[in-house]
Amino acid sequence: METSGVGLLAGAILGMLVLYQILLIVTRRRRFVKVVDALPGPKPHMVFGNVPDLMVAPNKLFEAWDERHRKNATLFRTWIGPYAEINLKEPEQVEAILSSSKHITKSNAYRFLQPWLGTGLLTSTGHKWHTHRKMITPTFHFKILEAFHDVFVEKCEILARKLARVADGKTEFDMYPFITHCTLDIICETAMGVRINAQDSTEKRSDYVSAIYEVSELTLKRAQRPWLFPNFTWALTDMGKRYKHCLSILHGFTNKVIRERKEVREGQRGQQEQHSQEDDLGRKKRTAFLDLLLDAREAGAQLSDEDLREEVDTFMFEGHDTTTAGLCWAVFLLGSHPHIQDTAAEELEHIFQGSDRAPTVRDLQEMKYLERVIKETLRLFPSVPFIGRKLFQDVDFGGYKVPAGCMINIPIYHIHRNPKQWPSPHAFDPDNFLPNRVAERHPYSYVPFSAGPRNCIGQKFALMEEKTVLSYILRYYKIQAVETMEDLTLMIDLILRPESGIKVRLEPRTPLS
Ligand code: HEM
């Protein structure tokens, strides 16, 4: 009897503790909702929040998203089901988040990338991110990027020759596949040391390349459908099954490359230096990011095979679609602004003096106007149109009190068109990047590569690559855009791209030797 009395008492205490915890959670949640709802923002649906506003056909998503941002003049909140998202408006607000080493955790949306990228540099946080960032930063040192320049040149020579077949001044064609294949060749060789020859049209598009496209498409479809957020429901759908199949191709490919690379390195130990510098066909072997990571591991860095795969997959994801989009938008803008194109071509003529020699790293540094073209392109059409963070501490954005637990959305596209910072926000004007104009603006009014501790580690690589590709196109061809801005439909499927590619006509400028 006595024992059951103690049991009852213990049960009652436990029950009260549970009740207390529930009350605490409910009270905190109510307080959180109250604070968030006090912020300006569109009226949410009771269950789905503001998600239904963006549940539109993929080619209408950009328009709906853009309209939402244009309608709200100040910082505003939206609800993604139960999650509160705060959309920033001003560069000071962007600075408060990006410059801080406290707000380095990505928002929930990034977890949709995790099945593919695991917790590589883009998606990880805390200790893992800190140690990996420190370890990987030296692999983007300028000296190492210089070594990749040979790869850029080799792939661009192929691009220029491929374009010669359609460059008759009359034929209209889509530039997108030409550039995608070129940047894919570049990233596969620089990240993994693998030649996939995507530019060789006689080769069937590899399963790996097809899987990259499909995974990006499926990830976006999932992000638009809240009922597919849980892994359980996602796995049951045809899309989820297709996604799983693509992942097995992607991971299988990267794992195979890592395995083979390790075997080659093992085999080379003890062999003559001469041999280790050549590939199977006797060509000069180039060091890839993967080799640098393997070197770091041999020097004692803590990197498991899975860590290697995650980082290589992250480079593949971040390092090719982004540059492709940036390049295609630059082609479109140059093809729509003949005066600007002429100025860029004159600069190249001045550097190369009619010669058809390959550009050196030094030449790239001299392409100051082309650099401004690239920067202005990334302002109008940032390849990554928005980024997100999760708050673990309250933040006061100049009077807007945002509690911990909120997601922060930084709409780079809209920050770059803020009329307070950019007098003609929608006009294409490379002179926006003349030093005196840059000095007049808030430093966080232009953040195509993000900024602060979690900025893009590949930005110098991207700039070098874009300059090389564009200089090849402009040296040999005159670009005419076939469509105007009004004809294009923008898509935000992870990156910002035109729905039906970039249609152009090319006219030969200088014959290829
Ligand atoms: C025009 C080209 C590119 C643009 C516009 C771009 C943009 C960005 C942005 C906005 C971020 C921040 C993402 C976030 O906070 O969620 C980022 C991060 C990153 N980017 Fe890029 N990127 C480009 C090219 C590249 C290239 C070529 C590489 C690698 C070869 C690369 C590798 C990365 C990595 C690894 C991160 C994560 C860094 C970290 O969190 O520590 N990116 N990029």
Image (cartoon, rainbow, N blue to C red):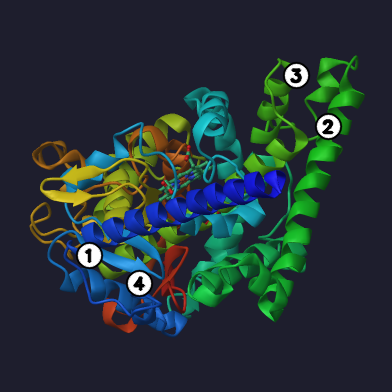
- Could you say which is closer to the camera, residue 22 or residue 288? 22
- Could you say which is closer to the camera, residue 11 or residue 104? 11
Q: CA distance from mark 3 to mark 2?
A: 11 Å
Q: CA distance from mark 1 to mark 3?
A: 53 Å
Residue indicated by mark 4: 480
Residue indicated by mark 1: 37
Kind of residue sitting beneath label 2? Lys
Mark nearer the N terminus (3 vs 2): 2
Residue shown at 51% from the left, 28% from the top: 130
Label 1 Cα neighbours within 10 Å, binned few <14 / some 14-19 / many ≥20: some
Kind of residue sitting beneath label 4? Gln
Residue indicated by mark 2: 262
Mark nearer the N terminus (4 vs 2): 2
Label 2 Cα neighbours within 10 Å, binned few <14 / some 14-19 / many ≥20: some
Label 3 Cα neighbours within 10 Å, binned few <14 / some 14-19 / many ≥20: few
Residue 345 x %, y %: 32, 52
Q: CA distance from mark 1 to mark 4?
A: 49 Å
Residue 160 x %, y %: 54, 57
- Could you say which is closer to the camera, residue 31 or residue 359? 31
Residue 508 x %, y %: 44, 65
Report the mark closest to the observer, 1 or 3. Answer: 1
Dot 4 falls on a residue whose secondary structure is strand
Residue 210 x %, y %: 69, 67
Q: Are marks 2 and 1 in contact (CB under 8 Å)?
A: no
Q: Are marks 4 and 2 in contact (CB under 8 Å)?
A: no
Dot 1 falls on a residue whose secondary structure is helix
Report the mark closest to the observer, 1 or 4. Answer: 1
Residue indicated by mark 3: 298
Say which mark, if any, is on residue 266.
Answer: none
For the question of whether residue 368 can be seen, the reply is yes
Looking at the rendering, which quadrant does residue 492 occupy?
A: bottom left
Kind of residue sitting beneath label 1? Asp
